[in-house]
Image (cartoon, helix red, strand yellow):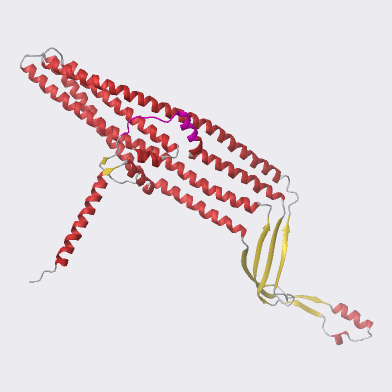
């Protein structure tokens, strides 16, 4: 019996490949890194996709403005029906002429009532017009369109940065909530174990009942805080899903980075002035305002254009014998009630307005950078201090637990030591959370999003 191995192995290989793809997709759907979340937000977020369309709108409008440099060609046609023919009646002059010539009957000279144009007529033309000088208006309009396109890109980037900062905040808030849940769960389990132990000691007459009541109250508080932590996880998860287009995930894989700050404040501030997208946006607005001044100044100059017409078809136009004509046309508005002067002043005030906004924005960014830097320093100091406190709190909890077990301590002391250690751990995690979110906000504002995502 002959067995075709290719036919047997082919379905098996296909099943294995499908299984691998399924497992890969399943794993990736379960675990979400901050970098993956960022790329999902870029591709799936509705607000960002709408902003991308606005950029495309401005790109097409920029291309449309370029058409001002080229000639425009148009076709036109008309067919008319007048109420009567257009003519000239010269019979009176004919009669006078016959008298001078001694002709007794003027009719001999014929009918001098001439029809110049019949009442039905029509024509079609092809017209071309090419502006050759408009006082620099076309150049300024093209430059303005280019700047508007760049502004739309900057505006999109600003919106992207704002959502990225939100995403970093929500992602690490979820991380914080999960860490808190883990701590709350351990506290609950520890106090529950201690409560059970206290009950046994009370039943054996070693400790009074009041000690068991302290343990029960602490257990109820621990349970309530554990449930609150679970709610925080749910809220943070929903917020992230909203930013990444509703994609689902079950866990996060990006960890907190430990607080290490090496760059000085002055270096951060100098970089902020150079790289911040909001400041670049204002600088582009200043350039646009200056182009607006050039456009208004162009109104003082004449407009010169080449013009031409070709007659494609005519009917009952005996007086028009030519087929085409070309020429140069010019218009010059000499006076328009001081409108141009006021518009130029308004455009110049616009430039000054943007310059003042730009100046204040630089000061605001310096203050903003200092605020973020000080927050980073604060959280770094908090984290290092809490790390020392955590060691002492662990030792205290161990000592309180041993004392209670030996009958020389109270359950309240054990609970207090456990809660104190938990609070220190929570404060430590919160310091990590605030450090990471602040550092992420600083890096995004410095236009270093990819650097930050690759570092964590």
Q: Position of residue 163 (x, y in %)?
A: 40, 40
Q: Nearer the viewer, residue 218 or 174?
A: 174
Q: How many marks?
A: 0
The reply to whether the magenta stretch includes residue 96 is no
Q: Position of residue 406 (x, y in %)?
A: 10, 15
Q: Which residues are magenta?
A: 256-272
Left or right: residue 176 compared with residue 57: left
Left or right: residue 260 compared with residue 118: left
Left or right: residue 196 compared with residue 131: left
In which image quadrant can residue 356 be found? top right
Going by the picture, which residue comes out furthest to the top?
408
Q: Which residue does the image show at 71% across and 43% down from the upper left? A: 341
* Quarter that holds the N terminus: bottom left
In which image quadrant can residue 194 be found? top left
Q: Nearer the viewer, residue 98 or 22?
A: 22
Q: Position of residue 147 (x, y in %)?
A: 55, 47
Q: Position of residue 134 (x, y in %)?
A: 68, 54
Q: Which residue does the image show at 37% across and 33% down from the upper left? A: 437
Left or right: residue 219 compared with residue 365: left
Q: Which residue does the image show at 19% across and 21% down from the upper left? A: 218
């Amino acid at each position: 019996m002959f067995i075709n191995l290719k036919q047997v192995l082919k379905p098996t290989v296909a099943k294995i490949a499908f299984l691998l793809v399924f497992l890969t997709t399943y794993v990736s759907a379960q675990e979400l890194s901050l970098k993956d979340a960022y790329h999902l937000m870029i591709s799936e977020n509705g607000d960002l996709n709408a902003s991308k369309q606005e950029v495309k709108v401005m790109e097409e409008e920029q291309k449309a403005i370029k058409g001002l440099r080229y000639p425009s060609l148009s076709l036109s046609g008309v067919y008319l029906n007048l109420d009567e023919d257009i003519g000239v009646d010269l019979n009176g002059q004919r009669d006078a002429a016959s008298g001078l010539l001694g002709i007794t009957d003027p009719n001999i000279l014929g009918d001098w009532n001439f029809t110049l144009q019949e009442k039905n007529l029509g024509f079609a033309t092809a017209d071309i017009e090419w502006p050759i000088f408009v006082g620099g208006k076309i150049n300024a309009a093209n430059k303005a369109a280019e700047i508007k396109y760049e502004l739309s890109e900057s505006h999109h980037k600003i919106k992207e940065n704002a959502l990225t900062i939100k995403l970093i905040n929500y992602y690490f808030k979820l991380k914080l909530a999960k860490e808190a849940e883990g701590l709350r769960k351990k506290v609950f389990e520890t106090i529950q174990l201690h409560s059970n132990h206290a009950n046994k000691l009370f039943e054996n007459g070693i400790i009074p009942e009041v000690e068991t009541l302290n343990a029960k109250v602490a257990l109820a508080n621990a349970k309530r805080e554990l449930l609150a932590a679970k709610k925080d996880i749910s809220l943070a998860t929903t917020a992230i899903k909203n930013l990444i287009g509703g994609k689902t995930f079950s866990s996060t894989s990006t960890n907190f980075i430990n607080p290490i700050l090496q760059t000085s404040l002055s270096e951060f501030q100098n970089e902020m002035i150079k790289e911040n997208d909001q400041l670049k946006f204002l600088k582009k607005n200043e350039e646009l305002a200056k182009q607006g001044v050039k456009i208004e100044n162009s109104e003082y100059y004449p407009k010169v254009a080449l013009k031409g017409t070709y007659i494609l078809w005519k009917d009952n136009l005996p007086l028009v014998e030519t087929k085409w004509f070309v020429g140069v046309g010019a218009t010059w508005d000499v006076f328009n009630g001081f409108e141009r002067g006021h518009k130029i002043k308004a455009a110049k005030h616009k430039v000054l307005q943007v310059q003042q906004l730009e100046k204040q924005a630089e000061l605001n960014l310096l203050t903003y950078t200092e605020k973020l830097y000080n927050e980073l320093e604060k959280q770094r100091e908090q984290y290092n201090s809490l790390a020392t406190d955590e060691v002492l709190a662990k030792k205290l909890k161990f000592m309180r637990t041993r004392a209670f077990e030996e009958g020389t301590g109270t359950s309240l002391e054990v609970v207090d030591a456990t809660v104190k250690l938990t609070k220190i751990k929570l404060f430590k995690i919160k310091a990590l959370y605030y450090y990471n979110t602040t550092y992420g906000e600083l890096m995004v504002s410095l236009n270093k999003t990819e650097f930050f995502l690759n570092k964590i």
